[in-house]
Image (tube, rainbow, N blue to C red):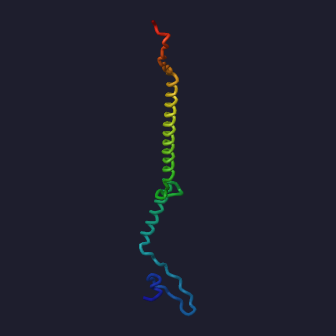
Amino acid sequence: MSAAQQHSGGLDQVTPQDGERPAPAPFVTTPNAERYLLEADSLRRRQLRSALLHGSTRVWRERRRIWPAALSGLVVVAVVVAAIAVYGAFQRQQRITEEEQRRRQPVPVVTSPSPKSPSARPR
C-alpha cells in the first residue's frame, strides 16, 4: 500500500505527473450512504420535535432546572422566617398577658402585728 493510499484511508488517488493537471476525482460513493441519510433525517426530526416541545433555544437534556430549585428555596426560607416571626410574636404576647394579670391582681397587704403597749392592756 502506498503512502497516498494509507493517508487517504485506502482510496486510490491519482497524483499528478510531470506538469499534468490532476484529473477530477470521480464520484466516490460513501459506504452506507443510505444509512447516514436516514440517521441524519432521524436526528433532524428529533431536534425539531424537541424544539417544539421544549423551546427553540434548548433541547430537553440541556434544560436547566435552576428556577424551580430557586423558587422552592425561597418558599422554604419564607416559611422559616414566618415561623420565627409567629413564635416571637406569641412569646411577646404571653409576656404582655402575664404583666396585665399581675397588674389586675390586688397587692396583698402584709400587716404585722404591732406590739401592744403595756398601757393599752385591759385591766
Classify 43 as above or below 19: above
Instruction: Using the image as rendered, state which of residue 118 and residue 103 is in the foreground.
Output: 118
Instruction: Using the image as rendered, state which of residue 25 and residue 115 is in the foreground.
Output: 115
- Residue drawn at (48%, 12%) of the image: 118
Q: Outermost residue toward the bottom?
A: 18
Instruction: Using the image as rendered, state which of residue 2 and residue 29 is in the foreground.
Output: 2
Q: Position of residue 35 (x, y in %)?
A: 42, 69
Q: Position of residue 83 (x, y in %)?
A: 48, 39
- Residue drawn at (49%, 31%) of the image: 94
Classify 122 as above or below 51: above
To which quarter of the image does residue 38 belong? bottom left
Q: Position of residue 30 (x, y in %)?
A: 45, 75
To which quarter of the image does residue 9 belong? bottom left
Q: Quadrant of the C terminus?
A: top left
Classify 31 as above or below 90: below
Q: Quadrant of the N terminus?
A: bottom left
Q: Position of residue 115 (x, y in %)?
A: 48, 16
- Residue drawn at (48%, 20%) of the image: 110
Q: How many marks?
A: 0
